[in-house]
Every structure is written in structure tokens, then in C-alpha cells.
Amino acid sequence: MKQKTMQELKNEAMSTLQEYFPNGGRDWDNVTAVIDAIAEGKIPNVTMFTNSTFESAVEPAIKWLNDNVHPHHTIVITSTDAELLEGQQTHRTEKFLKD
């Protein structure tokens, strides 16, 4: 999966917000300024981020799986533990899903 740049995240946010400000104007300029401030880290406790921190956290576990066990193993990680599981049989179906 391609990592989104800060500019791509900003553009995505602005595109969504444009639905709420279809006529532009001063409000739109202020919204743009707020998005810029968030992207530049100027507003405390409000951030735009990519998944790079998630990726850097899980890649060692993925590497460990590849180096130490066969492909039928998975790791489930919660906020309190990690569990190594081995799949022995699986069946996937979507025929019972409702729209």
C-alpha cells in the first residue's frame, strides 16, 4: 500500500470539506488556513498523520513470522498481549452477508 504524503492527506481533507463550502468565500479561506495549521503541527493535540507509525510498529512482527514460522501462522496483538496462532483449516464465504 502506497504511503500518503502530507500534501495528499491535506488535499483529501480539503476535497471533503469543499462539500460543506461549495461557494468558497471567506469561510473557505479560513478552513484552508486551519487545514494548513494542522498539517504544519501548529494546533496542539490535532494532527494529520499517515500510517507510517503503524507500519514501523508491525513490520518487526511480520519479519519475525517470516523468519521463524511457516505461512499458516498469524499474530493477534492487543493492547495487553500478543498471541501466535496456527491456522489448520479455513473456509471463506460471503454468501450470508447482507447488503
Image (tube, grey):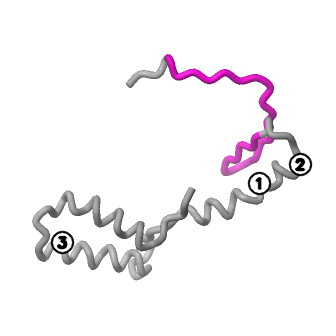
Q: Amino acid at mark 1?
A: Ala
Residue at left offset 62%, top offset 24%:
92
Determine whether label 1 and label 3 are within 8 Å by CB. Answer: no
Q: Magenta segment range?
A: 74-95
Q: Which dot marks residue 83?
A: none
Residue at left offset 74%, top offset 47%:
81
Residue bearing the label numbered 2 = 68
Q: Classify mark 1: helix, strand or loop.
A: helix
Q: Amino acid at mark 2?
A: Asn
* Position above or below: 71 against 21: above
State the image coordinates of residue 86 (x, y, percent, origin top left).
Answer: 81, 33
The Cα–Cα distance between marks 3 and 2, rounded to whole angstroms, is 53 Å
Q: Nearer the viewer, residue 81 or 6?
A: 6
The Cα–Cα distance between marks 1 and 2, rounded to whole angstroms, is 10 Å
Residue bearing the label numbered 1 = 61
In this rendering, would 80 be left or right of 10? right
Tally of numbered tags: 3
Residue at left offset 44%, top offset 79%:
41
In this rendering, would 54 be left or right of 41? right
Residue bearing the label numbered 3 = 28
